[in-house]
Image (tube, grey):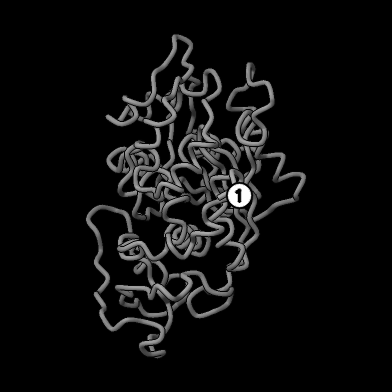
Amino acid sequence: MRAGDDPADRDDERVEDRGGRHDDARRVCPCDQRRGDDHHDRERGGAVWPEGNAKPLAWVIPAVTGRPRPTSCSKTRSTERAVGAPGSCENPAVEATFVLVHGGGHGGWCWQRVARRLRERGAEVYTPTLTGFGERSHLDVSTVTFETFVTDVVNVFRFEDLRDVVLVGHSMGGVIVPRVAEAVPDRIRRVVWLAGAVTADGESLIEAVPQSPWIARAVTLGPDGTAHTDPDLVLDANIHDGTPEERAFVRERHLPYPPHALVEPGRLTAFLALGLPTGYVTALDDRTIEPAVCARFVARLPGCLALEVGGGHDCMITRPDEVTDALVTMAGVPAG
C-alpha cells in the first residue's frame, strides 16, 4: 500500500466483513424485508432499547422514514457492499450538507471513509483541516488558539456559501463546533459531537476529559500545556480496535497538539443560548473519551439526541458504516 493511500480504497470489503461490526453498532436496514435470502440472512433479532438515554438507530430511523420500527438484520452478507447507491432501499438519498471537523493530531484525512459513504448517499461533505495539522502542518502554530480553528471552519461556510449544515466535531473538534455555530447560527441544522469534548465555561480540555489509563501512558504535558505524545502508545488509546493497516494509516499522519490547545478555557453558555438542535454519538469502546465521560457531556446539552456506535475513539476510521448511519440519522431527525 502506498504511503498516501487510505486503507479504505483497497480494504473496504475486508473491513466490512470483520465479524460483529454491523451488529455492534445496531445497524438497521430499512427495507421492507421482502427481498428474500439474496438480501438478508434469516436470523433476526428484535431491536432492544439500551439503558440510559442513548437510542439505537433502529428506534430513531422511523422518525425519518415514517416506517414501522424494523427488526435489525443480524448479519450482512460479506459479498454485499454495506453502502448502496443513493436512493436505494438500503440507503435512501440524503439531502444534507455535512462539515466534519477533526480532533487533535488528526486532519481532514481521518474522515475519508465516512465522507465517501455520505457522498455515495447523495450528501455534500466538507472536511476542513485545522491550522497546523495534516496538509496544513507547515504553518506556524506558535500563536494558534481555538479561535484560529474556528476561523478555519467558518471560512469554509462563508467561501463555500454553506447553509443548513450538520456540523460535526470529533474529540477536540467538539470544542470548536459550538463556537463555529455561534459565528454562523443561521447556517446550522444541527451540531453533533462524535466522541467529542463538551467544555463548560472556563473549563479546559484536560479538565473536561479525565485522563484514561491509556491516555495517561501515551501523553505527558509540559508546563505550558504542550502535549508530548508517544506515537505508538496513543494508537492503543485512539484506535486499539483497528487493523494493522488502519493503525499504520493513523500512525503515519498523527501530529502533536499545538501549544495551549489542552489548557485554553472553553465555553458553552453562549452556544446553548442559541437553542440550536444538538446530537452526541458515543463510541462504546472508546479508551480516550470513555463512555461514562460522554454521558456527562450529553447531560450538558439539553434536548440532545444521543446515539451509540461500536468501536473506539477513531470510529470514523474503524467503523465508517456505523458512523455514517448515525450522522445520517442526525441529519434527518427533526429538532425536538
Amino acid type assigned to the residue bearing label 1 in the image? Val
Q: Residue furthest left?
A: 51
Number of numbered discs on residues: 1
Residue 103 x/y as whole percent: 51, 37
Q: Indicate left or right for 194 with 148 as reference.
A: left
Residue 133 x/y as whole percent: 60, 32
Depth check, front residue: 49 or 210: 210
324 in relation to 152, above or below: below
Residue 317 visible in rendering? yes
Q: Residue at x 70, y 52 (%)?
A: 162
Is disc 1 surrounded by few (<14), some (14 to 19) or many (20+) residues within 10 Å?
A: many
Residue marked by disc 1: 99
Q: Residue furthest right?
A: 159
Q: Indicate left or right for 90 with 49 as reference.
A: right
Q: Residue furthest front?
A: 1
Depth check, front residue: 306 or 36: 36
Q: Residue at x 70, y 46 (%)?
A: 157
Residue 5 x/y as whole percent: 59, 49
Residue 335 visible in rendering? no
Quadrant assignment for the C terminus = bottom left
Residue 100 x/y as whole percent: 57, 47
Q: Residue at x 45, y 77 (%)?
A: 66
Q: Residue at x 42, y 77 (%)?
A: 30
Q: Secondary structure at mark 1?
A: strand
Q: Quadrant of residue 215?
A: top left
